[in-house]
Structures are given as structure tokens and as C-alpha cells.
Image: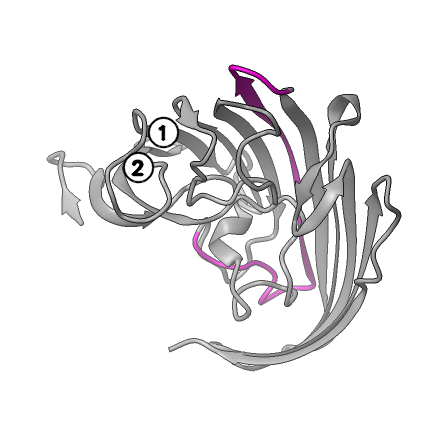
Amino acid sequence: FKQVLRNSDATLRVGRLKADIGEETFTDNPVEAILINNSVPIVAGYDEGIQLFGTTKGASPVRYSVGMLNDSAGTGASLGSPGAFLKLSGNPDAAKKVYLSGSYYRTDDMPAANTTEVRGCGLGGAPAGAVQWRRNLWEVDATLNYLGGNPPYGGYGRKGAYGGRLSYGQVSDNALGGGVDRDGDYWHVEGLVNLSPAAYLAARYSDLSLDRGVAATIAGVPAANAVSRLQIGLGYRLSPLAVAKIEYLLNDEKRAAGELNNDALTLGVSAKF
């Protein structure tokens, strides 16, 4: 990392980096996440690129993050112009218990065979029948009680009684040279209640629905028009960097071939070094 502006915390990052899009991306691991599995529409991934980030000065500082990504699978040359992302976030309240953020991500036109390394909304590659394609995505997030956390690079609710997050976004995959555009909206709401300093109860509901009856592979579910997921779990913090969790996950799919039998009970113990 390189500090690039005098009297500022503006920092330049070059190389393989985590795309700064949405908030769940920074807790998409078994230690920091409140549950074992991610939401259906999580936007996350690493790619080669360049990023400038920092925080403005003043009474109500705003964190900014802007960057360009290779947007091609693997580490070879990009198959089109680089993709780009922009994110603004901050605390609107003096007590700093509410954290708001807005993210935007756009790729350039890509061959249909190309898939981006940033996993977008649980969707796979190009829309069916497309010769080329491009993706536009935006998301807004509101998180309550980042007590004991370090937004946006930390979990919430480790101290205090509770914490929660509400997210909403839209994705538009444009089919170029043939095929049908793949557009949809997604959202998730999650919450955590501490039962003791170590034990907590957590739950999340997430959904991604495509417009005009279009079907695609969503979060690993083939030929689906919509996928929703309910997760309920218990966690026990063994240490600040180790946690044991149990989670029950119920999936619901809207697809012509009918629902899959893919509900699950998951138990995990994880540590971060």
C-alpha cells in the first residue's frame, strides 16, 4: 500500500485485491460472518486491479473507494477494457451506531465465454444466447451497531445487545449480439442478538429475483427465476479469532423443474490466524 496524498490517509493499492462492493464481502468468511453460509446475492471476489481509498476530513467524514479491475477469469490479459467500482460510506449519526454505504460496479463489454472473478449476486457468466455481455450493479447497505467492530472491515454486534444489516441492490446483465437481458433485484436482512458475552443467536433472509421470467443459474441452482434463503443459527465465540457455529438453512427456488432438495444443517468451528 502507498500513501499518495500529503496530509491525507488516501492510499493506493495495486495488485490482486478484494473488490470493495457492498458490505457482506468483508465478512464472507466463517470467522467474521455471523452465520456459516453467505446470502444468496452476495457480491464478492478478488481480482487484479488498482484501488484508491481513504476518508475525507470534517465533522461528518465519508469513506471513499474507487478502483479498476481486470474483469477476466485468471491472471492473464483482460478480454475487454477494465471494469470499475465506486463506493461511498459513513456514519450519519453522532453516536456512530448506524453505518451507511452505497456501491456501484460496471464491467466493459466482454465475450460470452468470459466470467468475472467478482461473484455477482450468485449469477454465473453471460446471459443465454449472448455474443458479448456487460454487467451493471448497484447496492445500498445500512448496518446497525458496529459495536466493537471496525467498519467496513469487521463484523458487528460483538459487544452490546444486538446488531443488524439491511441491503438492497439491482443487477443488470446486458446481452449483446443476441439473447435476452438478465435483470433483477436482490435484498437481504440479517440480525444478531447476544445471549451472553460469548453466545449469540443470528438469522438472515435473502432473495434474488430475475425480471420477465428469465431463468439462470443462481447461487448454484440451475434454471431458476428466483432463489430465497432463510438461515437461523447459534454461535459461540471461543476467542476473538475463533468461533463455533450451528446453522439451519432453508432454500426456496422458483423454477420450472420444481424445487431442489437442498436444505441443510451445518456445524462448523473456525479460527483466523
Q: At 89% from the left edge and 47% from the top edge, which residue is drawn?
A: 258
Q: Which secondary structure lies at badge 1? A: strand
Q: At 62% from the left edge and 29% from the top edge, which residue is drawn?
A: 128
- The kind of residue on which mark 1 rests is Gly
> Which is more toward the observer, 158 or 155?
155
> Which is more toward the observer, 67 or 111?
111
Above or below 66: residue 158 = below
From the viewer's perspective, is 273 left or right of 7?
A: right
Neighbour class for label 2 at 10 Å: few (<14), some, many (≥20)? many
Q: Where is residue 270 shown, x and y percent of the image?
A: 53, 79
Whether residues under marks 1 and 2 lie with C-beta atoms below 8 angstroms apart, the answer is yes
Q: Residue furthest top?
A: 177
Q: Which mark is residue 70?
A: 2
The residue stretch that appears in magenta: 153-179
Asked whether residue 86 is drawn in magenta, I would say no
Q: At 60% from the left edge and 41% from the top edge, which residue is drawn?
A: 123
- The kind of residue on which mark 2 rests is Asn
Instruction: Quote the CA–CA distance across marks 1 and 2.
Output: 7 Å
Q: At 63% from the left edge and 79% from the top edge, which residue is drawn?
A: 268
Neighbour class for label 1 at 10 Å: few (<14), some, many (≥20)? many
- Confirm whether residue 169 shows in the render: yes
Q: Which residue lies under the disc numbered 1?
A: 83
Q: Which secondary structure lies at badge 2? A: loop
Q: Residue furthest bottom?
A: 238
- Confirm whether residue 198 shows in the render: no
